[in-house]
Image: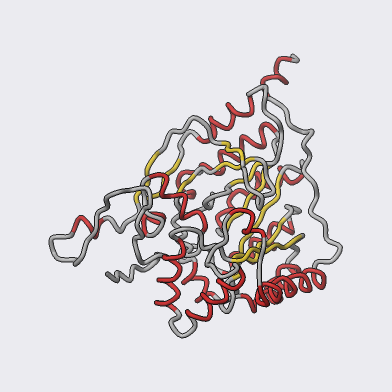
Amino acid sequence: MKLNMKGRGSQIQVKNKFLQNEYTVEHIEGVDIEFLEEQKTHYIPEYPNKIVNKVFSPVVPFMYSMNPYQGCEHGCVYCYARESHQYWGYSAGLDFERKIIYKPEAANLLKKQFENRNWQVSPIMLSGNTDCYQPIERKLELTRQLLEVCLQYKHPVSILTKNALIQRDLDLLKEMARLKLVHVGISITSFDNRLRSLLEPRTASVQKKLETVELFSQNKIPTIVMVAPIIPALNSHEIPTIVKKVAELGALGVGYTTVRLNGEIADVFENWIRTTFPDRADKVLNQIREINGGNLYSRGKNRLKLHGETSFMIKNMFRVAREKYLKGRVVPEYDLTAFCRPNEQLRLF
């Protein structure tokens, strides 16, 4: 069933591997009003016991992460986090974009964590799973509350986002940067706005992302650009252009990842590429298989290993661009010694 829903990356509802049964609609008729209403975004509160998670991954350079949201209305068709939505009983397809779980007590949980005497100071990734500046953040301000707590306790944090909404929190980020407590990552997939809107329909425009890089660089907020994900035969040729431009705007560093089609995301992406770019779908999918040793996704330690001429080309193109345009730039280290508990300071008086 083809719905052609505007503003959605996925156009299909893939099966949740953890559920034995599922609802389906074979043909939309006049009586299916309730089903059509389900295409709207729903926001679901969740009250967990903690907000900080320990990271066990060979590809993530952080010990901790925290996610005020699960699911993401940005709708990036390639997003690796889609698979985790199944643990909540939802689909990695359309549900990931329209069933958004939020954590109202996130800031209080973070304070509780910092007050724990056994807490070991280490940079926290905000967010490691879904975008902490997705559209609903404009209303709920959970990410801003978390940053306020980090500033209050002088705890280091790293942010990665695709949304220019992060500009709203410039006041907090400037102060955190002065204290060496923050790094900001801006994800730029393509300079082609049409391709961007198809790959990630509800993210900020290319112009707004570049504006954010320049604004933060001017305000001495350490800014890194992730050219990610690189999708062979789709956006891989843009690497030098993107690196050059963000270097001109003041970025201190750049990074990249190749597309990860883990689990059911492979079905979402294949449906998307065959519908959106049928003329090059086979080429794109075959080159993704090439860099993953014959599969659309490599698991375990194999995730760190890329294969074939395509991966060699991507790696070299990125290395040359970084050396040419960003040589000598250094991202400042975090100050891990600044951490303090406000209540302890008050007791001194």
- Choose top left, top right, bottom left or bottom right for residue 15: bottom left
Residue found at x 44% / y 42%: 102
Instruction: Give residue 320's position: percent from left, percent from top.
Output: 79, 73
Q: Residue furthest left?
A: 31
Q: Nearer the viewer, residue 70 or 301?
A: 301
Please state if 13 lies on the left or on the right of 75 as rendered. Answer: left
Residue 71, relative to residue 243: is it above or below? above
Determine if residue 179 is in view: yes
Residue 261, relative to residue 56: is it above or below? below
Q: Nearer the viewer, residue 79 or 138?
A: 79
Residue found at x 80% / y 46%: 333
Please state if 271 lies on the left or on the right of 325 as rendered. Answer: left
Instruction: Give residue 290's position: percent from left, percent from top.
Output: 59, 73
Point out the image quarter for the N terminus.
Answer: bottom left
Instruction: Give residue 241's position: percent from left, percent from top.
Output: 69, 76
Residue found at x 46% / y 85%: 279
Q: Nearer the viewer, residue 339 or 35?
A: 35
Determine if residue 9 is in view: no
Q: Residue furthest bottom?
A: 279
Residue found at x 65% / y 46%: 171
Please state if 247 lies on the left or on the right of 234 as rendered. Answer: right
Residue 228, relative to residue 88: is it above or below? below
Instruction: Give residue 229's position: percent from left, percent from top.
Output: 59, 65
- Choose top left, top right, bottom left or bottom right for residue 267: bottom left
- Choose top left, top right, bottom left or bottom right for residue 236: bottom right
